[in-house]
Image (cartoon, rainbow, N blue to C red):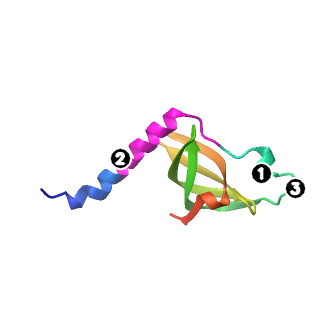
């Protein structure tokens, strides 16, 4: 039996979107705390043209990789925003959770 190569990537994207949607429904999006960010004593860079990145986030402790926009950053953390279905999410993640341009 063969696989349908023509639609394989589309089916994979649809399955990834479903998994992300289910994961987002299971718990609250986690973000770094004020104590971890130390924004009052750390310089913050705001990007007027956010870059697309791949980032690891957690919903209720479950890690999932998303395609996001990096909006702001410090030397150690990045503020991202991303969509799951019709809902936009925003959070801060450690810089190491960013895998670079999508």
* Residue displayed at 27% across by 57% down: 8
Residue 68 in picture, x, y percent from top left:
55, 54
Query: Residue extending furthest front?
Result: 61
Query: Residue extending furthest bottom?
Result: 101
Tell me if label 2 and label 1 are in contact, CB under 8 Å.
Answer: no
Q: Give the camera-side residue of 75 and 73.
A: 75
Judging from the image, what secondary structure is the residue with disc 2 in?
Answer: helix
* Residue displayed at 51% across by 38% down: 24
Sequence-wise, the earlier of marks 2 and 1 is: 2
- Estimate the spatial distance between the alpha carbons at disc 2 and disc 3, rounded to whole Å: 42 Å
- Estimate the spatial distance between the alpha carbons at disc 2 and disc 1, rounded to whole Å: 34 Å
Tell me if label 1 and label 3 are in contact, CB under 8 Å.
Answer: no
Mark number displayed over residue 41: 3
Judging from the image, what secondary structure is the residue with disc 1 in?
Answer: helix
Residue 18: in magenta span:
yes
In the picture shown, does residue 26 fall above or below 99? above
- The stretch of residues the image draws in magenta is 13-30
Quadrant in which the N terminus is drawn: bottom left
Please state if 36 lies on the left or on the right of 15 as rendered: right
Q: Which residue does the numbered mark 2 point to in the structure image?
A: 15
């Amino acid at each position: 039996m063969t696989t349908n190569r023509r639609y394989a990537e589309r089916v994979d994207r649809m399955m990834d979107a479903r998994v992300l949607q289910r994961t987002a429904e299971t718990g609250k999006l986690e973000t770094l705390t004020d104590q971890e960010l130390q924004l009052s004593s750390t310089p913050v860079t705001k990007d007027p043209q956010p870059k697309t990145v791949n980032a690891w986030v957690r919903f209720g402790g479950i890690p999932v990789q998303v395609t996001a926009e990096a909006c702001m950053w410090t030397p150690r953390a990045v503020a991202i925003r991303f969509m799951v279905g019709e809902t936009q999410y925003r959070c801060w993640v450690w810089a190491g959770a960013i895998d670079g341009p999508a």
